[in-house]
Image (cartoon, rainbow, N blue to C red):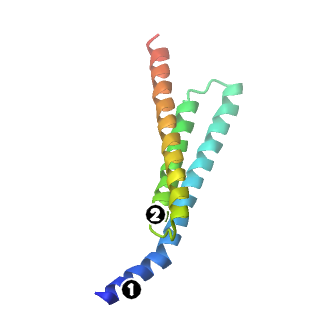
């Protein structure tokens, strides 16, 4: 049993930081790609009619990127060594959850606005 515990600790110490970095990179990639797409469609809409739902799609990519970043923060709780780090991670998680809820609320409002425009 002690040998299993050492193997598990080794896996946690060696692989969890790598997984955290991959999740963070995935979240950042989603945010950057979403921002570039939104910027492209914004510039395009200045010159021609663009039916791309810019605000909704950008909010969707921000929410998805934050979900990956939140997953990384949750995994960080596995490797935390002291209470100060736990409080800091807890605060970060709470802030990211609040941001996610605000973005989802904004997305719902944008969908309502789009449906109202379509029905007119």
Mark 1 surroundings: few (<14), some (14-19) or many (≥20) residues within 10 A: few
| Side of 105 where 32 appears, left or right | right
The residue under label 2 is: 75
| Residue 29 in the image, given as x and y percentages of width and height | 59, 54
Residue drawn at the location 44% of the way across and 20% of the way down: 115
> Within the image, what quadrant is residue 59 found in?
top right
> Within the image, what quadrant is residue 12 found in?
bottom left
Residue drawn at the location 60% of the way across and 27% of the way down: 50
State the mark number for residue 86.
none
Residue nearest the viewer, comparing 117 with 105: 105
Which residue reaches farthest top? 120
- Above or below residue 85? Residue 81 is below
| Residue 7 in the image, given as x and y percentages of width and height | 38, 85
| Residue 25 in the image, given as x and y percentages of width and height | 57, 60
Res. 22 visible in picture: no
| Side of 14 where 46 appears, left or right | right
| Side of 48 where 80 appears, left or right | left
| Residue 105 in the image, given as x and y percentages of width and height | 47, 31
Residue drawn at the location 67% of the way across and 25% of the way down: 48
The residue under label 1 is: 6
Circle 2: element type: helix
- Above or below residue 26? Residue 16 is below
Residue nearest the viewer, comparing 108 with 82: 82
The quarter of the rendered structure image containing the N terminus is: bottom left
Residues at marks 1 and 2 touching, judged by CB atoms closer than 8 Å: no
Circle 1: element type: helix
- Above or below residue 14? Residue 41 is above
Res. 25 visible in picture: yes
Total numbered labels placed on residues in the image: 2
Residue drawn at the location 52% of the way across and 54% of the way down: 69
């Amino acid at each position: 049993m002690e040998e299993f515990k050492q193997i598990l600790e080794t896996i946690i110490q060696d692989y969890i930081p790598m997984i955290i970095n991959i999740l963070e990179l995935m979240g950042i990639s989603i945010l950057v790609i979403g921002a570039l797409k939104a910027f492209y469609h914004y510039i395009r809409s200045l010159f021609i009619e663009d039916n791309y739902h810019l605000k909704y799609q950008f909010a969707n990519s921000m929410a998805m990127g934050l979900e990956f970043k939140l997953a990384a923060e949750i995994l960080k709780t596995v490797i935390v060594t002291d209470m100060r780090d736990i409080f800091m991670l807890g605060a970060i998680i709470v802030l990211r959850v609040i941001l996610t809820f605000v973005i989802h609320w904004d997305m719902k409002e944008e969908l309502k606005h789009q449906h109202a425009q379509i029905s007119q």
